Image: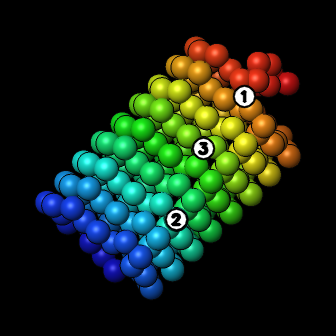
Amino acid sequence: MSFDGATFCEGAWFRRLVFSGHASFEDTTFSGGTSFDVATFSNGGSFDRATFCDLSWFDRATFMGNLSFYTTMFAFDASFSRATFAGVTSFRQATFSGDTSFENATFSRGTYFNRARFARNTSFRGATFSDPISFCETRFSGSSSFRETTFSKMASFSRASFSLAVSFEEATFSARRWFNDVKFLGSVYPSGLALE
């Protein structure tokens, strides 16, 4: 199913919808509030270069295949709380201008937030990364939380920057973690974690 290049001038509501094939929303503009809550993407999807101009919700959505949000613009708050990402997932160079939540989300395959930009408060609290995760060169301009987050494989924050406080309290790292050349401009909790 393709909505490439489409413009939704009002709210777009895909709540609980099942996309049986690959779902493509490349270069799509969502002018109003957008909901993909509890939607199922059975064969992955692409939102490359899409623009969300208002609130966007993907809470408890299920992405069964590979998923891409390359250079996607979230101009307002975005929520992926309790979403399930079963395939390789990319948010490379995505921009999150509002508060962003990935709380209790599950990532089963490789996940990439390389060079993404989070302008306001960001939470990955309780999220689970079962495969390698990369936040290389990611910029967190607001406060950020990885509290109670599980990193089962390699986790890289190389050259990332945190402008305000960041929490890794009660986070679990089961494999190698990389914090080389990270800039911490605010407090880090618990202190010393990133230096181990």
10 Å crowding of disc 1: few (<14), some (14-19), many (20+)? some
Residue 125 x, y percent position in the rendering: 63, 43
Q: Looking at the rendered structure, which numbered label has been put on residue 179?
A: 1
Q: CA distance from mark 1 to mark 2?
A: 30 Å
Q: Position of residue 75 (x, y in %)?
A: 30, 42
Give neighbour class at mark 2: few <14, some 14-19, many 20+ (Cα, 10 Å). Answer: many
Q: Measured along the vertical axis of the image, is residue 187 above or below residue 98?
A: above
Q: Does dot 1 land on a helix, a strand or a loop? A: loop
Q: Nearer the viewer, residue 116 or 99?
A: 99
For label 3, the SS is loop
Position of 67 relative to 98 (above/below): below
Q: For marks 3 and 2, give the CA distance.
A: 14 Å
Residue 60 shows which numbered tag? 2
Q: Which residue is mark 3?
A: 124
Which of discs 1 and 2 lies nearer the camera? The answer is: 2
Q: Nearer the viewer, residue 87 or 145?
A: 145
Circle 3 packing at 10 Å, graded few (<14), some (14-19), many (20+), is many
- Foreground disc of the pair 1, 3: 3
Q: Are marks 1 and 3 in contact (CB under 8 Å)?
A: no
- Name the amino acid, label 2: Arg
Circle 3/circle 2 CB separation < 8 Å: no
Work out whether 177 lies above or below 59.
above
Q: Quadrant for the N terminus, please.
A: bottom left
